Amino acid sequence: MLLVLLLLPMCWAVEVKRPRGVSLTNHHFYDESKPFTCLDGSASVPFDQVNDDYCDCKDGSDEPGTAACPNGSFHCTNTGYKPLYISSRWVNDGVCDCCDGTDEYNSGIVCENTCKEKGRKERETLQQMAEVTREGFRLKKILIEDWKKAREEKQKKLIELQAGKKSLEDQVELLRTLKEEAEKPEKEAKDQHRKLWEEQLAASKAQREQELATSAFQELDDDMDGAVSVAELQTHPELDTDGDGALSEGEAQTLLGGDTQTDAASFSDRIWAAIRDKYRSEVLPTDPPSPSAPDLTEPKEEQPPVPSQPAEEEDDEEEEETEEEEEGEEGEEEDSQVQGEQPKETPPPVVPPQTASPTEEDKMPPYDEQTQAFINAAQEARNKFEEAERSLKDVEESIRNLEQEISFDFGPNGEFAYLYSQCYELTTNEYVYRLCPFKLVSQKPKLGGSPTSLGTWGSWAGPDHDKFSAMKYEQGTGCWQGPNRSTTVRLLCGKETVVTSTTEPSRCEYLMELMTPAACPEPPPELPAEGNHDEL
């Protein structure tokens, strides 16, 4: 169309005698000096039978100016506008189909000739399009030059990054070695520190366990004869093994390893481990036990004996058992502190020394100065290594991005490269559509909500002769019980870059139009106008 407009001055109206409804290009087939041969070669008729309102040819070519042949064509000359072929059935049907009115020559209808006005408007439209094309192509050449420069700069940057990458790799390996060397003495010092602490903790726990066993032995040794007998052990029914609530003589003897009595050493070595979880001290605590208090409380050194009647003593024991069951059997070895029971009619038992709280003992003490120095040195080496490793990863990521961008197909001359880092939006009544060329297409509800992917970059999708006229975006969010969404983007010539429309011609298949200078073809050269002419 642009070419027709620009070559307009060369086109002059030429009046050639020919039958009504015949175009200039076909007039040589209609020679009135000889019979007419049907254009399909099916027959020949005398020339006076052309346009005689009777269909002689199968293709209707003998009646180009009448409605006799339903399959014939009538040519509208439309002087001042565009020539047009219409169906012969529309000839003299009372409707003006040709802008020059020549199709209604015998219908009684007077048709106004609108060809000149239509031609004027068409020329204005074509001139505007030609101006857009010229300006768009001018911008396109700038885009091509910009990409050439940008590509050269990116290639230089790529070379610099690749050279810097080698240096960074060497630095990372050096810092890795220094880090590993610094971590060896750190690990040895920390292991040694933990080992000493664990040994101290084990010794402390063993000491506490021995103190608990000694205190329990003294409490059980009612007659203070240096031995715990079966009868003395039976005073603690909580050690019952068959669940009948009482510790029989046989059960007590079994706990004593088959002996009738045991001394302190044997009690500590063999007996205490078997009964410690069930054993309850006979001495009542002076304060109510808290939920975190250990099972066995430690009496005050000058505490006097607590007199009690046998029945009351039994009640006290049951009460203590109930309290202990509510607290749960949480007594860890380090949580237990023995509360010695005062022997009947005897001085108070030997009280074990005060020990540190379990929380304090379970917490590993701070590192000594030398160990902390090793830790600080190793941490500094790790920080330097990690920083260098991050720098290397950043450089590798930049190299990958540059290589991808430099090698990307941005059109015959790179004219579409400027779209690579841009995004464009179109807002409709319901959605906001977003196109990021060479990356993705999405839609988001206008009133808020999560975006839906309409596809990610697939390939150029124009026809073979115009490959770069369309883009394809694939594998978007799947439709419910349907395929994955996809979008075709048609590229149109324009002075600005803007998304002009988005439609969904098929379910889950979207069509978007993007106007861009990069899609403008090279216009034909401008020719000088030479006055008014009849045909467009």
Image (tube, rainbow, N blue to C red):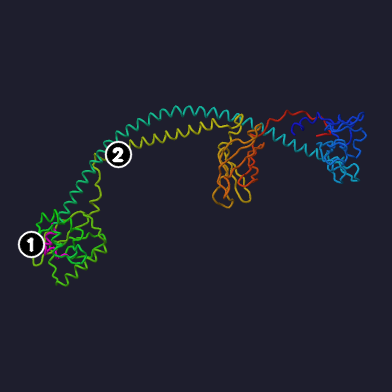
- Tell me the element at label 1: loop
Which of the 4 image quarters holds residue 333?
bottom left
The mark found on residue 407 in the picture is none
Q: Is residue 466 visible?
A: yes
What residue is drawn where x is 58% and y is 52%?
447
**Of pointers 2 and 1, the one earlier in the residue sequence:** 1
Which of the 4 image quarters holds residue 33?
top right
In the rendering, at what x and y percent does residue 279 appear?
18, 61
In the rendering, at what x and y percent does residue 372 appear?
26, 40
In the rendering, at what x and y percent does residue 403 appear?
51, 31
Q: Which residue occupies the foreground of this view, 474 or 413?
A: 474
Which residue type does callout 2 highlight? Asn
Q: Is residue 284 left or right of residue 227?
A: right
**Residue pointed to by mark 2:** 376
Question: Label 2: few (<14), some or many (≥20) within 10 Å?
Answer: some
Magenta-colored stretch includes residue 89: no
What residue is drawn where x is 50% and y is 27%?
156
Most extreme residue toward the left, as rendered? 225
Quadrant of the rendering where the N terminus is positioned: top right
Question: Label 1: few (<14), some or many (≥20) within 10 Å?
Answer: some
Which residue type does callout 1 highlight? Met
Task: Give the label, 2 or 1, closer to the camera.
Answer: 1
The residue segment tinted magenta is 214-236
- Tell me the element at label 2: helix
What residue is drawn where x is 70% and y is 30%?
523
Q: Which residue occupies the foreground of this view, 306 or 241?
A: 241
Q: Is residue 287 above or below residue 409?
A: below
Q: Is residue 181 left or right of residue 165?
A: left
**Residue pointed to by mark 1:** 224
